[in-house]
């Protein structure tokens, strides 16, 4: 059995291989650009991209997206990648220095679209709280 992972991220690919290959499942990387919407949560982003890719490829796919939420700032959420490029860790720590609430959480959403006679969608949102 082979699973198709939509990602350009080598870390995500390595993690998927580590999990699936111990069960004898081969991981196939789909390293192509697919639409990624701007949304308020990782689930909507993953779901949209997975559905578009499955329709275009005509095969089942898995798509994972993750977000870091900093409660005091109400961000960056799904915009983590953008914020990382614009704001250094040092600058973020400066901003957070006087914040009484330094809590946050990490959100991961994994969507599996199974293409068969019918179109199936499975998803699993996971929140890791601090």
Image: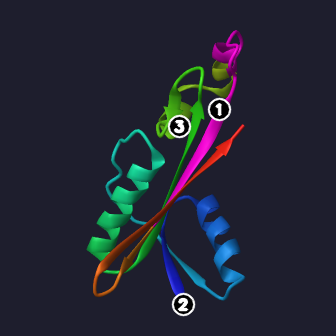
User: Whole-percent x and y of residue 125?
Assistant: 53, 54
- Tell me which numbered mark, 1 or 2, is placed earlier along the sequence: 2
Residue 113 on the magenta segment: no
User: Whole-percent x and y of residue 80?
Assistant: 53, 37
Measure how far apart labels 1 and 2 are at the Cα level.
38 Å
Identify whether 12 is placed above or below 45. Answer: below
Asked if labels 2 and 1 touch by Cβ distance under 8 angstroms, the answer is no
The foreground one among 128 and 3 is: 128
Considering the numbered disc 2 on the image, is that residue within a helix, a strand or a loop? Answer: loop
Residue for point 61% across, 85% down: 25
Residue for point 56% across, 58% down: 9
User: Whole-percent x and y of residue 90?
Assistant: 69, 22
Q: Which residues are magenta?
A: 93-111
Considering the numbered disc 3 on the image, is that residue within a helix, a strand or a loop? Answer: helix
Identify whether 114 is placed above or below 43. Answer: below
Considering the numbered disc 1 on the image, is that residue within a helix, a strand or a loop? Answer: strand
The foreground one among 100 and 25 is: 100
| Residue 33 visible, this orientation | no
Q: Residue beneath label 1, please?
A: 104
User: Where the N terminus falls, by quadrant?
Assistant: bottom right
Q: Residue beneath label 3, please?
A: 80
The foreground one among 124 and 108 is: 124
99 lies left or right of 30 = right
Identify whether 71 is placed above or below 57. Answer: above
User: Where the C terminus falls, by quadrant?
Assistant: top right
Residue for point 64% across, 19% down: 91
Q: Residue beneath label 2, please?
A: 1
- Tell me which numbered mark, 3 or 1, is placed earlier along the sequence: 3
């Amino acid at each position: 059995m082979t699973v198709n992972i939509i990602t350009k991220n080598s870390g995500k690919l390595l993690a998927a291989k580590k999990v699936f290959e111990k069960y004898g499942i081969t991981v196939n990387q789909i390293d192509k650009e697919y639409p990624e919407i701007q949304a308020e949560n990782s689930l909507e982003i993953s779901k949209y991209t997975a559905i578009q890719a499955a329709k275009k490829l005509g095969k089942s796919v898995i798509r994972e997206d993750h977000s870091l939420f900093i409660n005091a700032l109400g961000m960056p959420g799904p915009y983590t990648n953008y914020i990382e490029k614009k704001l250094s860790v040092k600058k973020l720590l400066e901003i957070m220095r006087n914040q009484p609430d330094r809590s946050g959480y990490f959100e991961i959403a994994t969507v599996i679209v199974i293409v068969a006679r019918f179109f199936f969608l499975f998803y699993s949102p996971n929140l890791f709280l601090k």
